[in-house]
Amino acid sequence: MQWKSTLSSDEKAMLLRQTRGEFDKKYRKTEDFDKDLPEEKVEAFSKVLEKFFDSEVEDYVKQRDAKAPDYDRLKKKCAVKAYDWSLTHKIVEVDRDASRMEDMAEARMKAALAKGDKTLVPCGASYQEKWIMKNDDEESHKNNVEFLAKFKTAMGTPKDEAAKKMLAELSVPAMGEKWGLDVPEFWAHQIITAKEMSDKEKLSKADFMKAAEDLTKKYAGENQLLRQYASNLRELAKSETYVEGKTRGQWARELHEAIAEYNKKNKMDPPPPLDEEHIAELDKTPCTKPDDPEYRNPWQTAAKLYKSEAFDSFGSKYLLGIYDTPEQAVKVFEEWNVEYEKARAQLKEETIQWGKQEQARLDKDPAGQERVRKAVEEARR
């Protein structure tokens, strides 16, 4: 650059130091960093920049003017590819039992902390994680068989039929075959933490196995309790009955009497008295009838439910409903999609007809189109 040749060796060295020390906090505080070139050389450099930008502007204008607009660009763009308007379907499992278990677990943990009880093993939701076990030699295969036997013993006999069946079907494959074991995430983290503490304290394998077995037994007991609680809630919701003329207040009185009798029989404190004003309000409210959607609502009676969701090509989500089985969720989507496709076909036909009408209107006035193009060309000059 011609301007650079006008700088002295000292000025070049100063610019180099300032450039290298731009992000050096200590250097930025020195007087050398604040030095500047003589005013006439700064002004000369600004003129160089001005010529550079003027040249760039001229090149841009020449390129812009040389390129004619494509008046049919929109039509060509639309003809490149047909847009996919189809819907996609998604089924989301809603584990209602897991929600019930989580609520009960939280309540039990709070009660245990309030009492200072440290023996309760917290049990979160029933998330699973997969453990890939080494099973490619005699020693690892033998350890796996021993581990699974102790695991089943520690888990006991679950009252939940699904859990009982799953535990009974667990087995170690033949040596050399891959083995992946789905285990409760919360329990897995407890065992991993226990192993880390065991290694830190340098405990023997037997001591670690004993601690792991104890944790597993406590976890299994707590898990079975929570599963039973969730099952009891479902059965309670299923037992909802309707008696013509009976009010909610009457049910509340009968429930209070039953609780009082149970507490007396088990030598427990009697329940607090009912609020008569509230009971009077309940007497005015009739019970839910069998034809009411809230009567034995699946949200209260089901262990799992399934959300049926549809997504359009723009990313919008539509909740079609919540159903008892995946098959019902799929059926509803298929029925909904048929109506959606009909509406899309009608809209597509209307759009095509509108396009034809607009094109016909433009074709009737070619002179008008030419005038518009000339005006655009003149404006660009």
Image (spheres, rainbow, N blue to C red):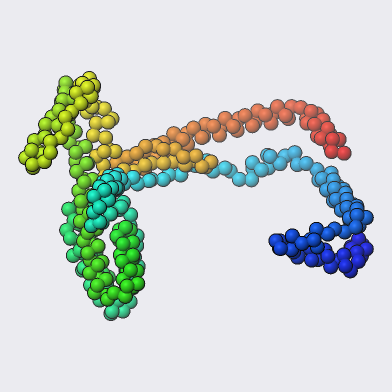
Placement of 63 over or under 12, stated as above or below: above
Q: Position of residue 22 (x, y in %)?
A: 74, 61
12 versus 346 height, above or below:
below
Q: Position of residue 235 (x, y in %)?
A: 19, 41
Q: How many marks?
A: 0
Say which residue appears at 8% left-offset and 38% top-offset.
264
Please tell me whether residue 235 is drawn above or below residue 180 in the rendered image: above
Q: Is residue 269 or residue 308 the one in the foreground?
A: 269
Q: Work out whether residue 188 or residue 110 is closer to the camera in this orientation and state it.
A: 110
- Locate the C terminus and report the quarter of the image it occupies: top right
Image point 16% across, 21% down: which residue? Answer: 245
Where does residue 164 sit, x and y in percent of width and height?
20, 57
Q: Quadrant of residue 351?
A: top right
Residue at far bottom of view:
138
- Give percent across and percent down for residue 52: 87, 53
Residue at the spot 58% in from the left edge and 43% down from the top edge: 82
State which quadrant residue 155 falls in: bottom left
The residue depicted at 13 percent of the width and 29 percent of the height is 254
**Which one is in front, 160 or 274?**
274
Q: Residue furthest left?
A: 265
The answer to whether residue 222 is left or right of residue 266 is right
Depth check, front residue: 233 or 189: 189
Residue 171 shows up from this direction: no
206 lies left or right of 267: right
Q: Quadrant of the N terminus?
A: bottom right
